[in-house]
Amino acid sequence: MLTKRKSRSIAAVLAFAGTVSISGWHKFYLGQPLWGMLYFALSWTPIPKVASAIEAVWYLAQDEEAFDRNFNMGKSPIKQSPYIVNQVGAIADALRELDTLRQDGLISEYEFEQKRRQLLDQIS
């Protein structure tokens, strides 16, 4: 849970759920187990329920960038640009064509492997 990307909406739902049931699940989800245990320990008082409601609103009020800064170590979701997708598609097509040339006997196994490595190196 500590390395997986956290969702703002799931955190808000868990926090809202803590206003009617046991509070603190959202803290465990967000990688704050000590706070989660404190919420569990104080569950006989209204304090964690009020805090959960306030935090749920706070999570929803934040934009994705602020939430990522606070709970995802500043990492935003990886979005692939159309350029990268097109480049990978072009390399896949070139690999297919190269394999066809190898199967037809127009290039040797060694030449195929050299070209394949060159094409795959372009991806990374």
Image (spheres, rainbow, N blue to C red):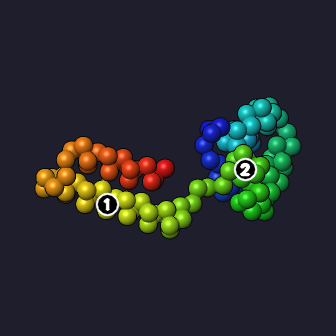
Name the residue type under label 1: Ala
Please identify, in this view, whether the residue under mark 2 or under mark 1 is nearer the observer. 1
Residue 85 at x, y percent in the picture: 46, 63
Residue 37 at x, y percent in the picture: 76, 32
Q: Label 1's element?
A: helix
Name the residue type under label 2: Gly
**Which of marks 1 and 2 precedes in the sequence?**
2
Q: CA distance from mark 2 to mark 1?
A: 37 Å
Label drawn at residue 74: 2
Q: Label 2's element?
A: loop
Residue under pointer 1: 94
Left or right: 93 in relation to 100: right
Residue 53 at x, y percent in the picture: 79, 53
Look at the image and tell me in which quarter the N terminus lies.
Answer: top right
Left or right: 71 in relation to 86: right
Residue 106 at x, y percent in the picture: 16, 55
**Residue at the spot 78% in from the left edge and 62% down from the top edge:** 61
Label drawn at residue 66: none
